[in-house]
Image (cartoon, grey):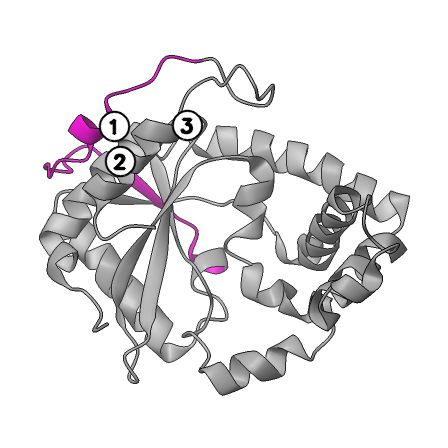
Amino acid sequence: MARSVLDVALMFGAIAGVDPLDATTLDAPLDDFAAAAQPRDLAGVRIGLDADYVLTGLDGVTEAALKAAIATLQAAGATIVEVSVGEVRPMLEKATAAAFVEAAISHAASYPSARSSYSELFTRLLDVGHAASARDYASVAIWRREFHGRLRRVFRHADVLIAPVMPTEPPPLEAFAAMLSEPPLSVAPLLVYTIPFNLAGVPSLTLPMGTEPSNGPLGFQLIGPDLSEALLLSVGAAYEHAAGTAAKHPAV
């Protein structure tokens, strides 16, 4: 999270790479991320748009902002190509529950044995993880491999994909507080544009696309194939330059 794409690039350059103390890190050559995060012409860059997925279920404010962002990318030289990532919505609730299963595993040493030290919200989340079936968790594990394979085929026709971050404008604090009292899995529909790509393990870059009427931020994602961080930063920097978003900071 940063004020500019270049700041993101500098941060990513500092944390990317193999860590001998972390077996999950990837030992792969690193790009010059700061050099990638410079404004450029997007001629030749193909941005994949799955309209059935991306533009279905959006509120009016989010849809208008996303279409404006797409127009900005086109004005910078990018070509919009039609793609299909397939249907993801049937997996959202199971995928969210799977994340809660992993949270339960991470907290196994202290939950439920030290249940009283946890917040009510987090205990409800962990209880969902404990109650999930092995079959449902396995179905998500299988689906994420299949979805990753599907994306590899999609990226033969597009360099990056575009999608909003959320289907609606950000809820005000009162509405967000009310959401916290709902069952934990009720948040799944809000994750329709994020959790599938998180599960696939592919990189994404979130960029601002204006504000909603009460001045809350709106954002969209550029999503790329494995190890495409430099490309995402490059396209993001071009959009940022064309849209002038780097100079727009919220009042503090």
Which residue is more in the foreground, 40 or 88? Answer: 40
Q: Residue 15 location, x and y as percent? A: 39, 29
Disc 2 is placed on an element classified as helix
Disc 1 is placed on an element classified as helix
Give the Cα separation between the discs numbered 1 and 2.
Answer: 5 Å
Asked whether the residues under the numbered discs 1 and 2 touch, taking CB atoms below 8 Å apart as contact, a structural biologist would say yes
Numbered label attached to residue 9: 2
Q: Amino acid at mark 2?
A: Ala
User: Is residue 120 shown in magenta?
Assistant: no
Looking at the rendering, the stretch of residues picked out in magenta corresponds to 28-52
Q: Residue 178 location, x and y as percent? A: 61, 84
Disc 3 is placed on an element classified as loop
Give the Cα separation between the discs numbered 1 and 3.
Answer: 23 Å
Q: Amino acid at mark 3?
A: Arg
Q: Quadrant of residue 124?
A: bottom right
Q: Amino acid at mark 1?
A: Phe
Tell me: residue 17, above or below residue 252: above
Tell me the crowding category of disc 3: few under 14, some 14 to 19, or many 20 or more residues within 10 angstroms, Cα based.
few
User: Is residue 34 shown in magenta?
Assistant: yes
Asked whether the residues under the numbered discs 1 and 3 touch, taking CB atoms below 8 Å apart as contact, a structural biologist would say no
Which residue is more in the foreground, 128 or 43? Answer: 128
* Chain-order first, disc 2 or disc 3: 2
Circle 1 residue: 33
Circle 3 residue: 156
Of badges 2 and 3, the one in the foreground is 2
Q: Main secondary structure of the magenta part?
A: loop
Q: Quadrant of residue 199?
A: top right
Horizontal relation, residue 70 to residue 161: left or right: left
Horizontal relation, residue 91 to residue 113: left or right: left
